Image (spheres, grey):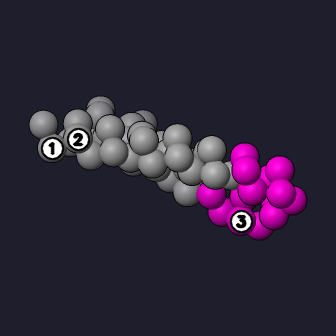
């Protein structure tokens, strides 16, 4: 149960980071947008690990 809640939380954070990175790229803040995309990728990996218990 705890892993599912953590996975859902990190999936929501991933979605939020993608939305913020799109806004940053529209305002031509390339560094901040890239940072948020890297954070979104990390959250995606964490949510996959939380749901399935393994990465690969």
Measured as percent of width and height from the top left, residue 22 is found at 72, 46
Q: Residue at x 42, y 41 (%)?
A: 12
Q: Are marks 2 and 1 in contact (CB under 8 Å)?
A: yes
Position of residue 24 in the picture relative to residue 8 (left or right): right
Q: Which of 50 and 15 lies nearest the eye of the viewer?
A: 15
Q: Secondary structure at mark 1?
A: helix
Q: Residues within 10 Å of mark 1 (few under 14, many from 20)?
A: few
Magenta: main secondary structure equals helix
* Residue 12 counted in the magenta span: no
Secondary element at image label 2: helix
Left or right of 48 on screen, residue 22:
right
Picture residue at 23% right of the left edge, 41% below the top: 5
Q: Which residue is mark 3?
A: 32
Q: Callout 2 environment at 10 Å: few (<14), some (14 to 19), or many (20+)?
A: few
User: Is residue 36 visible to us here?
Assistant: yes
Residue in the image at 62% along x and 57% along y: 36
Image location (x, y in percent) of residue 43: 46, 49
How far across and how far down the image is residue 30, in percent? 81, 62
Reading the image, the residue beneath label 2 is: 5
Q: Is residue 10 left or right of residue 3?
A: right
On the rendered structure, is 36 left or right of 52? right
> Bounds of the magenta span?
22-36
The crowding category of the residue bearing disc 3, from other C-alpha atoms within 10 Å (few below 14, some 14 to 19, many at least 20), is: some
Q: Which residue is mark 1?
A: 2
Q: Nearer the viewer, residue 18 or 49?
A: 18
């Amino acid at each position: 149960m705890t892993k599912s809640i953590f996975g859902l939380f990190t999936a929501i954070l991933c979605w939020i980071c993608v939305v913020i990175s799109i806004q940053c790229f529209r305002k031509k803040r390339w560094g901040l947008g890239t940072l948020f995309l890297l954070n979104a990728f990390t959250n995606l990996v964490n949510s996959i690990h939380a749901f399935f218990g393994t990465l690969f």
